[in-house]
Image (cartoon, rainbow, N blue to C red):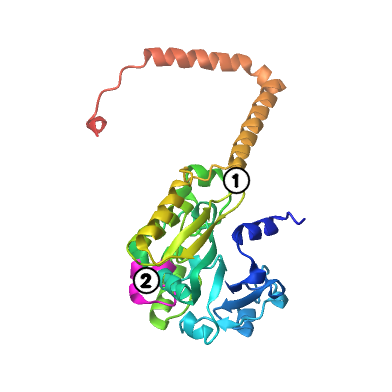
């Protein structure tokens, strides 16, 4: 039985689904679909056709260009229901690391609701800010959702581009600097780069691929719950699988629900089931790194104290210590100044 991390992750995301008996849709599968055509009735959706995707990822070593799945539906300027055409609604939708890229999240959810059957589910994998290059970015708020929805934007907004480009870092889970002094961690891009991309979006409506939305599991559940209570989307939380050790994502199953109160209650229940933990990435790796530095420092001190030079200079250190104590005893008291009050 396959127990690889990829298979275990897939099983968690598809929990309760039987692809062989259902009609599904997967968004942004590229060369790593969660459900293959041999396993069930599945439609592959992306923002562009295969030639465009090959050109886009030509220099991306993480994408197997030869293994790209054939795109059935291009979801771009038109609504998803329009792109779906005369095809029947689907029972489930899969989207792994897609949601955070969507410029108008509420609009995206509404379009998915329109192509799902009653009680249909949306399964998403979402990066956890605390364990990605988004670590220093602020979490998305309700006003951000509503602003993007009012604009009906289909390309990332200048504000979304600026926040991403100005604040992303090279995330290292073993970094002591990140754990203890995160604001001192260098950003990956310059102000000029950020302004250039934002200006290009503003003037030319150009698409710059960024993380438009930033979440932790708790902020995601709280935000989606508040939005559900206000009738801004029609999805309840079926389950939320919290970020696991050595992972940078959490998994969520959303189910179509037209009752705002019931939907909001489901998100509140999911929120209560999450651990309330510190946001700093004090992980096992960092603890091991701290212990390693401590042990190395102790070894250096022991080697120094065992050295011949340390033994030979012992009398001089004793004299310096004695003079230091005498100087402190005879030093006159310092006068108070006007700066002391400040």
* Numbered tag placed on residue 174 in the rendering: 1
Q: Residue at x 56, y 68 (%)?
A: 95
Q: Nearer the viewer, residue 277 or 284?
A: 277
Q: Which residues are magenta?
A: 146-162
Question: Between marks 2 and 1, how big is the CA–CA gap?
Answer: 36 Å
Report how many numbered discs are placed on residues in the image: 2
Q: Which mark is residue 15?
A: none
Of 230 and 78, nearer the camera is 230
Residue 317 forms part of the magenta stretch:
no
Quarter-of-image position of residue 21: bottom right
Rendering coords of residue 44 (x, y %): 61, 77
Foreground mark, 2 or 1, reads 2
For label 1, the crowd category at 10 Å Cα-Cα, with few meaning under 14, some 14 to 19 and many 20 or more, is some
- Looking at the rendered image, the quarter that the C terminus falls into is top left
Q: Quadrant of the N terminus?
A: bottom right
Residue 33 seen in the current view? no
Give the number of the disc on residue 148.
2
Alpha-carbon neighbours of circle 2 within 10 Å: few (<14), some, or many (≥20)?
Answer: many
Picture coordinates of residue 142, whole percent (x, y): 35, 61
Q: Secondary structure at mark 1?
A: loop
């Amino acid at each position: 039985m396959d127990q690889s991390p990829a298979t275990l992750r897939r099983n968690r995301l598809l929990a309760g689904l039987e692809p062989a008996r259902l009609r599904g849709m997967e968004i942004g599968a590229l060369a790593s679909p969660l459900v293959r055509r041999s396993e069930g009735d599945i439609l592959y959706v992306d923002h562009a056709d295969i030639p465009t995707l090959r050109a886009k990822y030509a220099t991306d070593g993480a994408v197997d260009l030869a293994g790209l799945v054939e795109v059935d539906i291009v979801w771009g300027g038109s609504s998803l229901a329009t792109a779906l055409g005369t095809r029947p609604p689907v029972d489930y939708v899969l989207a792994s690391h897609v949601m955070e890229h969507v410029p108008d999240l509420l609009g995206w959810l509404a379009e998915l609701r329109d192509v799902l059957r009653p009680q249909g589910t949306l399964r998403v994998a979402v990066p956890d800010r605390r364990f990605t290059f988004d670590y220093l970015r602020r979490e998305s708020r309700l006003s951000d959702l509503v602003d993007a929805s009012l604009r009906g934007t289909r390309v990332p907004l200048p504000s979304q581009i600026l926040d991403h480009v100005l604040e992303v870092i090279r995330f290292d889970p073993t970094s002591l600097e990140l754990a203890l002094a995160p604001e001192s961690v260098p950003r990956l891009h310059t102000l000029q780069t950020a302004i250039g991309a934002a200006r290009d979006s503003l003037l030319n409506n150009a698409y710059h691929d960024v993380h438009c939305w930033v979440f932790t599991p708790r902020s995601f559940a709280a935000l989606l719950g508040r939005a559900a209570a206000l009738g801004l989307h029609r999805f309840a939380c079926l389950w939320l699988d919290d970020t696991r050790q050595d992972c940078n994502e959490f998994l969520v199953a959303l189910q179509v629900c037209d009752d705002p109160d019931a939907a909001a209650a489901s998100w509140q229940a999911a929120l209560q089931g999450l651990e309330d933990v510190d946001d700093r990435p004090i992980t096992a790796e960092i603890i091991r790194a701290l212990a390693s530095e401590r042990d190395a420092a102790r070894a250096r001190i022991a080697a120094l104290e065992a050295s011949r030079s340390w033994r030979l200079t012992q009398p001089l250190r004793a004299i310096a210590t004695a003079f230091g104590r005498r100087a402190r005893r005879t030093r006159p008291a310092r006068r108070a100044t006007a700066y002391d009050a400040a």
